[in-house]
């Protein structure tokens, strides 16, 4: 797109979302019609509204125009409320008249997957690309600018509530119905600036919306729910831009399952793509990724109210219930949110006020005595908020009763003065009871419906700040400067899956220790080599393109005696002959590596998001246990160490039963080298699998390796068993 057209396109997006004049094409006086509903929703709009329909002269006392050419001005936006068959012609007319953008509600386009419908949607895209007009939809529920009252939807528009001091939530949803459902958060006094839906995204997509809200001053945090995107790099760049201007981006990526991905294709015609790769890429860009739609809204509200960066190393918990204290402590540990001890001065303040039958610490339980002495809670909360160890105060809301309302007012003022945040966790089953609306209205009190979501958000607060701090910092390379050249040479002639020996040669070029192996063509050679090496050995059958050798009966471990080596050589040879059609299979022998912790390090080049690194518990149970973590390659040592700590089995590295502790720093170093290999050759490699990587107290050795390269015609084919 030419620069002048690109600039006009962005300006037209602004005209569409923040219009001064709106045309409603297909406006109608008929009750219940979309044309009537849109006009009703625009009653509070602070700009000008022009009904357009040649069948009417007036609608509800307002002049109705026959066509765009009859309007007194060119509208910034046109809401098209007509059937599918007339949409294309109207959009062409809007582009000719210089309308900034259009909103299309009609369905029956790309989401049907029918070639003729896809073709019509493609024509809409072409109009946008060649004219600069912006098109929202088709198959969407519209655009709502709550601040200006531009509620361009046929659904019930959200009410306007008082914005929070730091700003409001800008909601983005690919799904129209979901977006409107989220907008009803205003009914509990959640402050929203915009509700933007994209539907089929023939032109305007969620990334365009993110870019717009990044520049919008009324929006403090962006909450985005989507199924998939067509341009992954555009999405990630938008996330980086949000991080650069310190605007929190909270994302819920739907279509995590195969069924969800299929539903996404039929719902909006969108390819969901790799869920895990998308989430990892967004986290790298500083976004907060959540796992539910409920969590998205509560997390976004928190980020609207909280300082951008936590001030302390942990949080404090103040309760009126011993049970709530226990739940908070358990949940904090689950999400690795520190609960530091009270400073001596803080402890003294609480000890002087809390009854003997309460508890002073972190958590602190001031008991139900606060019913008779409300100031006790306020004084304790104030002392904890002044404590430099704490960035936030968690106050479980046990009873939804009127006496709690003034407490919320006090908590809000205490948090404001400390420039911190209070998290009010709503334990009461009366979810709309006294204090719920007041919590949402308060500019420095975040409202959570579960303890789990509260501490998950507090953990994300810290991790997202750390991710933003790492953006732009140069990564110091761990592997040799020559590794990339050597790797390029080794990969130059590769086409499809590499053999284990070739794969391990590439790993060695990056400074990764590999088990030495030797090709043996006969029993005599195997016995001679085993004798020379001494100790136990391993026999493997090697077939081009086969990743899981053990499942094919091609691996024999811990062989010591000559007779068992000879017998297993014959067994491996027979298994090879059964698999190998071209006679290129061979047997390799290597020393048996001493027992250690088995790790899997893998990677693949995602077609949308690029090289992705996988770390997990290894061995034959890797697919059953599924204890893995994913990051964008390459990674630095700090990120590699975080990957290790994210594994559920991470305690095993500190020594477990008869297994010695593993040097985590050395393992992080290997992970970095592996990630650099994958990143350096992302154009040549489609996937890598090293399983197992055996880790002991004094060594980390790759005993197997599988690298699949991109073929000259696409991604390499292999016989990898699933």
Image (cartoon, grey):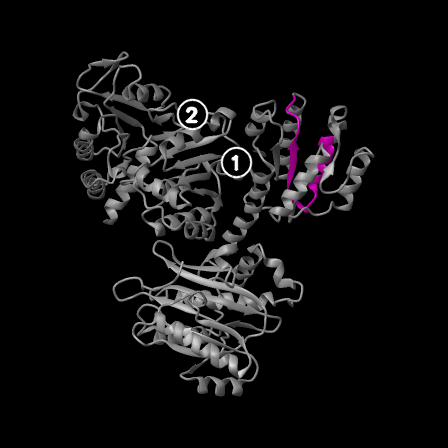
Q: Nearer the viewer, residue 443 or 480?
A: 480
Q: Position of residue 605 (x, y in %)?
A: 37, 60
Residue position marked by numbered label 2 in the rendering: 158
Can residue 165 be seen in the rendering of this structure? yes
526 left or right, relative to 663: left
The image quarter containing residue 644 is bottom right
Can residue 312 be seen in the rendering of this structure? no
Q: Residue at x 77, y 43 (%)?
A: 345
Q: Quadrant of the C terminus?
A: bottom left
Q: Residues within 10 Å of mark 2 (few under 14, many from 20)?
A: many
Question: In the orientation shown, which residue stands out farthest toward the right?
Answer: 356
Disc 2 is placed on an element classified as loop
Rounded to the nearest angstrom, the CA distance separating label 2 from label 1 is: 17 Å
Q: Residues within 10 Å of mark 1 (few under 14, many from 20)?
A: many
Question: In the orientation shown, which residue stands out farthest toward the top?
Answer: 61
Residue 473, label in figure:
none
Magenta region, residue range: 377-401
Residue position marked by numbered label 1 in the rendering: 298
Q: Nearer the viewer, residue 424 or 661?
A: 661
Task: Confirm or deny contact between disc 2 and disc 1 (CB under 8 A).
Answer: no
386 left or right, relative to 665: right
The image quarter containing residue 79 is top left
Q: Residue at x 58, y 39 (%)?
A: 454
Q: Position of residue 267 (x, y in %)?
A: 32, 37
């Amino acid at each position: 797109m030419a620069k002048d057209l690109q600039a006009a396109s962005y300006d037209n997006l602004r005209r569409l979302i923040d219009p001064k004049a709106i045309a409603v094409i297909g406006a109608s006086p008929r009750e219940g019609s979309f044309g009537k509903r849109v006009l009703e929703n625009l009653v509070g709009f602070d700009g000008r509204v022009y009904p357009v329909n040649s069948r009417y002269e007036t609608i509800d006392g307002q002049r109705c125009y026959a066509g765009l050419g009859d309007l007194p001005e060119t509208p910034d936006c046109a809401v098209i409320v007509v059937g599918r068959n007339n949409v294309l012609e109207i959009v062409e007319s809007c582009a000719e008249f210089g309308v900034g953008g259009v909103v299309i509600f009609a369905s029956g386009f790309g989401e049907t997957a029918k070639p003729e419908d896809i073709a019509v949607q493609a024509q809409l895209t072409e109009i946008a690309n060649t004219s600069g007009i912006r098109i929202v939809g088709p198959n969407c529920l519209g655009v709502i600018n709550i601040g200006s009252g531009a509620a361009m939807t046929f659904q019930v528009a959200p009410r306007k509530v008082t914005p929070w001091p730091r700003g409001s939530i800008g909601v983005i949803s690919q799904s129209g119905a979901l977006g409107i459902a989220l907008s009803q958060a205003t009914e509990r006094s959640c402050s929203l600036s915009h509700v933007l839906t994209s539907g089929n995204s023939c032109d305007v997509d969620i990334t365009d919306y993110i870019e717009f809200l990044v520049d919008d001053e009324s929006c403090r945090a962006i909450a985005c729910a989507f199924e998939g995107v067509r341009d992954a790099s555009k999405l990630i760049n938008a996330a980086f831009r949000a991080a650069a201007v310190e605007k929190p981006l909270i994302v819920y990526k739907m279509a995590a399952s195969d069924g969800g991905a299929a539903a996404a294709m039929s719902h909006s015609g969108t390819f969901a793509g790799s869920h895990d790769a998308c989430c990892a890429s967004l986290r790298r860009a500083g976004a907060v990724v959540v796992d539910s739609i409920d969590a998205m809204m509560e997390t976004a509200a928190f980020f609207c109210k909280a300082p951008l960066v936590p001030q302390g190393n942990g949080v404090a918990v103040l309760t009126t219930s011993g049970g709530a204290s226990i739940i908070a402590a358990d949940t904090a540990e689950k999400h690795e949110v520190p609960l530091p001890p009270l400073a001596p001065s803080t402890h003294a303040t609480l000890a002087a006020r809390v009854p003997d039958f309460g508890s002073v610490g972190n958590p602190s339980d001031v008991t139900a005595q606060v019913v008779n002495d409300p100031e006790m809670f306020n004084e304790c909360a104030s002392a904890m908020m002044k404590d430099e160890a704490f960035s936030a105060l968690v106050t479980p809301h046990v009873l939804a009763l009127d006496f709690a309302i003034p407490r919320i007012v006090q908590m809000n003022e205490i948090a404001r003065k400390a420039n911190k945040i209070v998290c009010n966790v709503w334990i009461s089953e009366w979810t709309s009871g006294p204090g719920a609306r007041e919590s949402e209205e308060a500019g420095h009190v975040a409202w959570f419906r579960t303890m789990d979501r509260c501490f998950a958000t507090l953990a994300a607060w810290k991790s997202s700040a750390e991710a933003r701090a790492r953006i732009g910092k140069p990564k110091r390379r761990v592997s040799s400067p020559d590794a990339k050249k050597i790797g390029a040479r080794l990969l130059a002639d590769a086409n499809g899956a590499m053999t284990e020996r070739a794969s391990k040669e590439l790993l060695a070029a990056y400074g990764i220790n590999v088990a030495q192996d030797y090709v043996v063509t006969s029993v005599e050679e195997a016995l001679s080599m085993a004798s020379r090496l001494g100790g136990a050995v391993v026999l493997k059958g090697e077939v081009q393109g086969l990743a899981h050798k053990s499942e094919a009966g091609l691996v024999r471990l811990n062989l010591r005696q000559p007779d068992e080596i000879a017998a297993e050589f014959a067994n491996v040879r027979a298994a090879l002959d059964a698999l190998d059609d071209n006679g290129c299979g061979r047997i390799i022998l290597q020393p048996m590596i001493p027992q250690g912790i088995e790790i899997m390090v893998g990677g693949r080049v995602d077609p949308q998001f690029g090289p992705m690194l996988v770390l997990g518990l290894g061995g034959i149970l890797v697919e059953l246990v599924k204890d893995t973590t994913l990051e964008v390659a390459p990674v630095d040592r700090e990120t590699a160490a975080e990957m290790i700590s994210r594994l559920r089995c991470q305690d095993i590295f500190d020594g477990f039963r008869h297994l010695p502790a593993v040097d985590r720093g050395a393992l992080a170093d290997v992970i970095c080298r592996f990630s650099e290999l994958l990143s350096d050759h992302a154009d040549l490699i489609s996937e890598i699998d090293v399983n197992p990587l055996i880790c002991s107290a004094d060594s980390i050795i790759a005993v197997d390796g599988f690298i699949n390269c991109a073929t000259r015609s696409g991604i390499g084919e292999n016989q990898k068993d699933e």
